[in-house]
Image (spheres, helix red, strand yellow):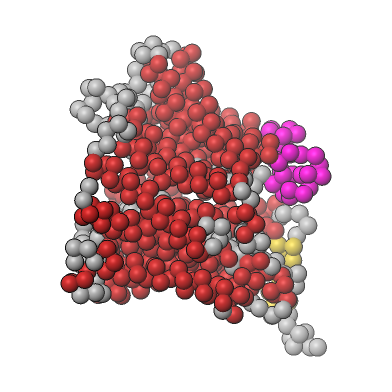
Amino acid sequence: MGIDFIIAAIITVVGLTTPILLAGLGELVVEKSGVLNLGVEGMMLVGAISGFAVTVYTFNPWFGVLGAAAGGALASLLFAVLVLQLNSNQVATGLALTIFGTGISSLMGLSFTGRIVMPFASVFPDALAKHEYLRLIFGYSPIVYFALIMVPLTTWFLKSTRAGLILRAVGENDLSAHSIGYSVIKVRYAAIAFGGAMAGIGGCYFSMVITPMWAEKMTAGRGWIALALVVFAGWRTGRLLTGAYFFGILMALELYAKASGFSFLPSQFWAAMPYAMTVVALSFISSRGTAGANAPACLGKPFLPST
Amino acid sequence: MRIKLEKRHEPSLAMLVATPIASVILTMLIGIVVFDLLGINGFEAVVDIFLSPLLYSYKWQDVALKAAPLIIIALGLSMGNRAQVWNIGAEGQYVIGALCCAGMGIAFGQTGGFLVVLLMIAAGIVGGGLWAAVPAWLRTKYNVNEILSSLMLTYVSFQVLGYLVGGPWKDPNGRNFPATAPLADAQTLPVWPESTVHLGVLVALILPFVFWVIMARSEFGYQVRVVGSSATAARHGGFDSKRTIWATMIIGGAMAGLAGGLEFAGVLHKIDLGFASGYGFTAIIVAFLGRLNPFGCLIAGIVLAVTYVGGQMAQTSVHIPNSTAGIFQAMMLFFILASDILVRYRIRLIPSAKAAGV
């Protein structure tokens, strides 16, 4: 097992981690505002096809990423209108968004099946990005760096800015936030749209970086892992990063087990691993009770001011 | 003018019935407009998807076969949703049910007959119930969110299926294709003469009555409704919400397992990698479109089955993709959820202060 193998393995892990990290960060902000959006998988798929389509038309992956963010945010607004304006059940509406996103993305993707896009060029010169060892640091798609920058940025936003404080207040006690004059609905709209944009970018990582082509249902349940990740992290950004890498390693294990043909266990065992481990990890986290203590108090409940 | 929402003391029965119908009609109307914008003949597409399967009698048995699993799964899910238990892993419980059914059949070799088929279906019910017992156990013991755990287990179930049909259960005469050997005739479900309609369709017609009796007439049904309406009320009434979680999860899983077993022994007769066809997810829409009412599920199951069959018909007639039916199904769910507010609230238009002359 040479150094090359280790570098390749780390690069694989980072790649697999990025989409769930992005979607997880977005959902964390949404949940901090007191809303549970189970539509992550659907928004990721809409992002995957929007990003891909925009890149095909503009030949510019940067516009593609913007398109993915816009697609994801647009999809999330559908959810937002129902949940915020019509007080619909958040669990069911989120599920509906996932079903809708799956359908609309495959309809949109029809004319794009079989096409490929240019891979996202590195922002660093080839001397660094393709260097035997330095590629470990410089050899990733710009989306990877974006995801990593968003971790401290989100932390800073939630902890140290006024807007972040308001967002958390709305998630903890919507009625008091409302009574001191903050618009609960507006804050939640913004949070949901942010979550949608992040899920969209996470989704386009599949269609623009990993493969890079479009395939139906290509996110393969990663949106749900992102949701689990938020609970796993106890609604804390730092732990979200750790958790995302934990799951990234599990998913990489599957790839390597398949490639190397570990024959003593069937490949399906490794494929089931990330999902099974998610359940195990959730059990550990949830049973300690600390996760529950950190959950935003208004999570999943409709906002019903008395007037 | 100002719009004001007034909470109703009782949910409006008229709205409970009217809104699902309105949702279906609205979905059709919007479908026409959207497809026209996409350059597809919208009217023809909507007629094909929503009406054609009803107009041609030879399509009725297709509708019945698709409706049966949807109704059966939705009945179980709606009971859980009534108690605020969110099992969204019915797809996995359906798969495991079918696998257990197949396993029982394999254990009997070529032996068949009524008793064997009954045991196979029973294995499906038990398998689905046990698969759903895992999220119930994790929820009651470790407080794990059942939405996530039941869904994660669905992905695990797909891998179990892949392993079994590609390994130990692979048909030796199947040209190395990952699928089980076709079921012996003696192990298949009885079928109505001259048709493909199997016994499971009858089960799907009877079960809504059973569920209605349980929900409306039994103490257990009352408990489910109380636990669902408020945890505090349930505690005051002396109801154990943990028991309700266990019961509704397992019933939901058992119903999904039953549906999986019936689909295997009644329709497909073998399991391959494409066995999971999304019934478990679509059944969630059925449950909501049916307003979590057993008879509502029956009707909604038929409506959704029509869109399935119609979607396939439209694929060949107006060349729209298979995913279109899914979009229509999601749209129906959006409308039904959006219209929920009409059931619980009364909308009043109040003249603004100026207009009232104050």
Please state if B296 lies on the left or on the right of A127 as rendered.
right
Is B165 one of the magenta-colored residues?
no
Q: Residue at x 42, y 52 (%)?
A: A246
* Image location (x, y in percent) of residue B350: 73, 76
Displayed quadrant of residue A50: bottom left
Taking the image as drawn, is residue B287 in sight?
no
Quadrant the C terminus of chain B occupies: bottom right
Q: Residue at x 73, y 48 (%)?
A: B231
* Image location (x, y in percent) of residue A86: 61, 65
Residues drawn in magenta: B213-241
* Image location (x, y in percent) of residue B15: 66, 55
Quadrant the N terminus of chain B occupies: bottom right
Please state if A37 lies on the left or on the right of B273 as rendered.
right
Is B237 one of the magenta-colored residues?
yes
The secondary structure that most of the magenta stretch takes on is: helix
Depth order, front residue of B317/A60: A60
Please state if A210 lies on the left or on the right of B122 as rendered.
left
Q: Residue at x 33, y 62 (%)?
A: A205
* Image location (x, y in percent) of residue B36: 36, 65
Q: Residue at x 50, y 59 (%)?
A: A239
Label count reads: 0
Displayed quadrant of residue B143: top right
Depth order, front residue of A13/A114: A13
Taking the image as drawn, is residue A142 in sight?
yes
Depth order, front residue of A103/A257: A257
Please state if B358 lies on the left or on the right of B76 as rendered.
right
Residue farthest to the front?
A: A2
**Image vertical order of residue B79 relative to residue B32, above or below:** above
